[in-house]
Image (cartoon, rainbow, N blue to C red):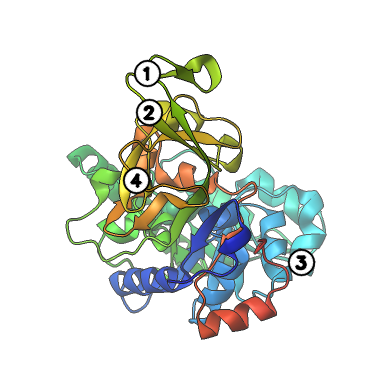
Amino acid sequence: MTYERAITARAWREVDLEAVAHNAACLQKRMGPGCRLMAVVKADAYGHGAGPVARYLERRGVAAFAVACLAEGISLRRRGVRGLILILGYTPPEGAEELARWRLTQCVADEAHGRALSAAGVPLEAHLALDTGMHRLGIPAEDHEAIARTWALPNLKVTGTFSHLCVSDGASPEEQAFTRTQLDRFYGAVARMAAAGLDPGAVHIQASYGILNLPPQPCAWARAGIALYGVYSREEDRPTVDPLRPALSLRARVAALRTVPAGEGAGYGLAFRAGEDTQLAVVTVGYADGLPRMLAQAGGEILIRGVRCPMAGRMCMDQLLVDVTGVPQTVPGDVVTLIGRDGGAEIRAEEVAARCGTITNELLSRLGARLPILRPLTEFDHALIMEASDQQTLG
Ligand SMILES: *Cc1c(COP(=O)(O)O)cnc(C)c1O
């Protein structure tokens, strides 16, 4: 694929929105007919660029989006997103005016939060969070009285009720049993609300792993984040036949080549020691771009001319060193791949995350500080680029 404006970039993300739309369709297929995809685009769409991702999906029929905070919700509206935007996290009551002005739906974290929002005196749309066992946000699902009191608060119009599964990625019998317990508590609470004449509104409980690992649920929405971007949190979760397509590639360039004689060190702390004469490439990306600093010394690799090459020594803030002795054709300016495909070779986000002892959710959502997002040049994309003067497509 050809990407726009990579020509002058030092290091960049390539985001294939077509892949995101494909993943959305795959997930939608697993959810059953009554349930619709809510695209989770918090943390700048896990590093994929929330504005372009949401707008592209909205054109493809996705009607709901979830973000973490007020500022992310406002940013989506400013970028022209018109569908439901649910703020999954806490917003202080001082934000009530802005919630209303930007037509954002606020999660009610617990009864106290509901009371504080209500007291702000601004009519708001709200989704009640129920705690079914994760003990993060939510009114205890078994506390029907608290749910009823919160539901009835003035200024809060409850248009949805939701919960979050905390071990739906687990395969052990204990984890599966706990997920069933959470589902039972959730549907029990919802049924009790309905029986008491308290309309729960649109209900939702699955996130990515809930969609991937559970049968279709009797819900209005399912909230997909990581799977929407075509990756799994951990490598071992990937099925042998994987219908999802990774949407993000991370690339940089060779700034310079250095021949380091046997016995010489290189980089901070001289942490790299050349056992024999070594050709090092200086690559134009570092930890200030969001890469974990430990990657270089945890066996991190890059692709250059379709070949895997090991990182050398310590990662710097803006650069890193790579041993390209095995690829003597390397020249300054060459494009290197840190995540993604190059020729027949591929480095997946799951692999990078595993080396750094984390999950892809963290790796991807931390990318970006100064990595422009480039997107494939298609006719449709051209239209989007012309229209979106607000997005980060720096060169
Ligand atoms: C982040 C988040 C999601 C999305 O989770 P994924 O595992 O990335 O799909 C869904 N619901 C809530 C409440 C979240 O905080």
Gap between marks 4 and 2 measured at Cα: 29 Å
Q: Which residue is mark 2?
A: 278
For disc 4, the marked residue is 350
Residue 240 point in image, percent of width and height: 17, 56
Residue 270 picture location, percent across and down = 49, 16
Of 294 and 149, the residue lying toward us: 294
Rounded to the nearest angstrom, the CA distance separating label 2 from label 1 is: 7 Å
Q: State which quarter of the image contains the N terminus.
A: bottom left
Tags 2 and 3 touching, CB below 8 Å: no
Q: Which mark is residue 100?
A: 3
**Residue with the mark numbered 1:** 262
Q: Quadrant of residue 246?
A: bottom left
In the rendered structure, which amino acid carries the disc numbered 4? Glu
Tell me which numbered mark, 4 or 2, is placed earlier along the sequence.
2
Disc 3 marks a residue whose amino acid type is Ala
Q: Are marks 3 and 4 in contact (CB under 8 Å)?
A: no
| Cβ at disc 1 under 8 Å from ligand 1 | no
Q: In the rendering, which numbered label is found on residue 179?
A: none
Q: Amino acid at mark 2?
A: Thr
- Which mark lies nearer to you, 4 or 2? 2
